[in-house]
Amino acid sequence: MLPRTAIERVSARAFTIPTDAPEADGTHAWNSTTLVVAEVAAGGQVGLGYTYAHASVASLVAHPLAGLLRGGDAFAIPALWQAMLGAVRNYGSRGVAACAIAALDVALWDLKARLLGVPLALLFGQAREEVPIYGSGGFTTYDEGRLREQLGRWVAEDGCRCVKMKIGGEPSLAEARLRAARQAIGAAELMIDANGACTRKAALAIAERAAGLGVTWFEEPVSSDDLEGLRLLRDRAPAPVEIAAGEYGYDRFHFRRLLEAGAVDVLQADATRCAGYTGFLQAAALAAAHQVPLSAHTAPALHLPVCCAVPGLRHVEWFHDHARIEAMLFEGAPEPRAGAIRPDLSRPGHGLALREAEARRFAVQA
């Protein structure tokens, strides 16, 4: 029986990191990304978690969540996770509240593994030694030269067998960019993401043109809230084109609705949004019960250990912005090799440590 280990300290800080170029997708444009890092200390160890969200997440951690966790048993993660959900009920348990819980849940799992002196991948129960990645970027702000260079590099240098690019909702513009991408990546699989920008009719037109260019994945062709539209696309898109959604799922109920509606060929889940590793494993269980593969959305370094524990995992997204930030700010961030990333089993926990000096210059007030 594990001895009770009281949580002594809980904190969070926000950092805003400029992008290396303007970025946009079908529905949103941005020039910076905010990272909120949470720490939970107990028994002489410190667990680290993070989320990509608004800086206000740090304020939610400070109140009410930090006070709720302090004094609790660091090994009682299910009880602490459920208590956090209850504490944010009146604020709305989705959105920034779910992101705050996500950062703390990841920190709690990291802390538990560090207290036990084991890698997190082994603590979860390792089902695989490596996790396939797909290169993801190709923002709509990129000209064709940058689009070709980025996607081609992921295939040629990192060994990615598939890459994903952003598209807007206009079929003719999407087709021109798809042709440029196809020339850059050769025989690799091409994936597209509309971020819900299309009408149903436009999405069908894009799917039909994309299939002729070897596209195998169409992410959020319409809004994830349009379950009937996603199901329509899944039923009517040409057979090679899989429909994917789920990145905006903040709880298991969202994933269940997508699956019960038959809306996706591949379910996506994001541990930085769906209340952490605990929520991600719930999504994985739902996907397995519906015989649908799971794909992890962005934050590849954070997802690596939990993805090792999911037998039905398809891959994790090697998202340009997050992979760049994780390599810049975290010691122990994985590096791609032959289209996959591997956990460092010589390091306890998830193996990540914040580079304080690097991070300090991006610090912002919550």
Image (tube, helix red, strand yellow):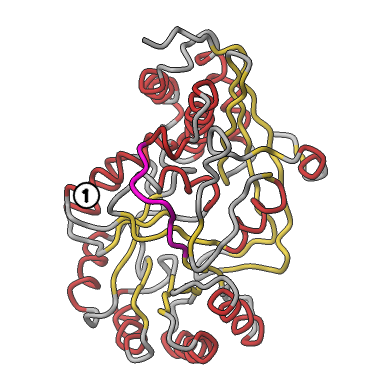
| Image spot of residue 123 (x, y percent) | 41, 32
Give the residue at mark 1.
Answer: 288
* Picture layout, residue 140 above or below residue 11: below
Name the residue located 64 percent from the left edge and 84 percent from the top edge. Answer: 143
| Image spot of residue 63 (x, y percent) | 58, 20
Q: Is residue 257 left or right of residue 105?
A: left
Q: Is 2 or 200 nearer to us in this picture?
A: 2
Name which quarter of the figure residue 309 lies in. Answer: top left
The part of the chain drawn in magenta is 125-133
Name the residue located 23 percent from the left edge and 83 percent from the top edge. Answer: 238
Q: Secondary structure at mark 1?
A: helix
Q: Amino acid at mark 1?
A: Ala
Secondary structure mostly seen in the magenta stretch: loop
Residue 132 part of the magenta-drawn span: yes
Residue 359 part of the magenta-drawn span: no
Q: Is 282 or 114 nearer to us in this picture?
A: 114
